[in-house]
Image (tube, rainbow, N blue to C red):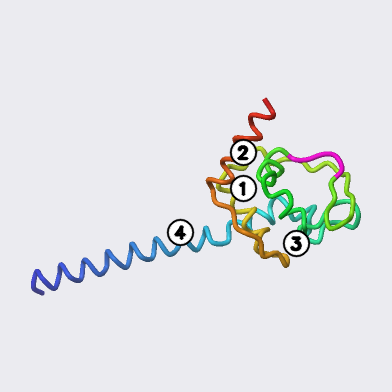
Amino acid sequence: MSSIKRNRLLGMVAGAAVLTTLTQCFTNKQNEGERLYAQHCANCHMDDGSGLRNLIPPLAKADYLVSHRDDLACIIQHGQQGEIVVNGVTYNHVMPGAEHLNKGQITNILNYIQTNFGNSNERFTIQEVEKQLDKCRHLLE
């Protein structure tokens, strides 16, 4: 085999390996929001985002997601207590925070919620989530 053919073959093999690796990375990240939602949110908000009767508010078609967009990252990380109104129904149940989640994980959860359960809301950027988290961190200090 000539050195040109061998170099070309090695280049093709290396390119295929890189492409396979990149494809697997993006595929794993593609469903991260769904996986994180199932792990951290679905127990209370249900797999379909419907909530739990008059105890836990729905995320499905929830007006709260739009009217409180600027608070959502902080709510996920630090939790929430007190009365809230979602789709005209008042809820007053403590939501625990997920302090251990990082800004990327929170962004993925929010984008999953924003684009599922009948929601077609604007997606979050990681920069937007970071800004929200910085703002609420200062309020908590």
Give the magenta part as a residue range.
79-83
Nearer the camera: disc 3 or disc 2: 2
Looking at marks 3 and 2 on the same chain, the residue that comes earlier in the sequence is marked by 3
Q: Position of residue 9 (x, y in %)?
A: 20, 71
Q: Which residue corresponds to the image point at 85% horizontal and 50% vertical from the top-left?
A: 85
Q: Which residue lies furthest to the front in this view?
A: 67
Cα–Cα gap, marks 3 and 1: 18 Å
- Please tell me which of labels 4 and 1 falls first in the chain: 4
Quarter occupied by the N terminus? bottom left
Amino acid marked by disc 4: Cys
Residue farthest toward the left in the current orientation of the protein:
2
Q: Mark 3 points at which residue?
A: 47
How far apart marks 3 and 4 lie (CA) works out to: 25 Å
Q: Which residue carries the number 2 mark?
A: 133
Determine whether label 4 and label 2 are within 8 Å by CB. no
Picture coordinates of residue 125, whole percent (x, y): 55, 51
How far is mark 3 from mark 2, CA to CA? 26 Å
Q: Mark 4 points at which residue?
A: 25
Name the amino acid, label 2.
Answer: Leu
Circle nearer the viewer, 4 or 1: 1
4 and 1 marks in contact (CB < 8 Å): no
Residue occupied by mark 1: 106
Badge 4, how many Cα within 10 Å: few under 14, some, many 20+? Answer: few
For the point 67% across and 65% down, the residue is 120
User: Can you tell which of label 4 and label 2 is closer to the viewer?
Assistant: 2
Residue 64 lies left or right of residue 115; in this view the side is right
Q: How far apart are marks 4 and 1 (CA)?
A: 19 Å
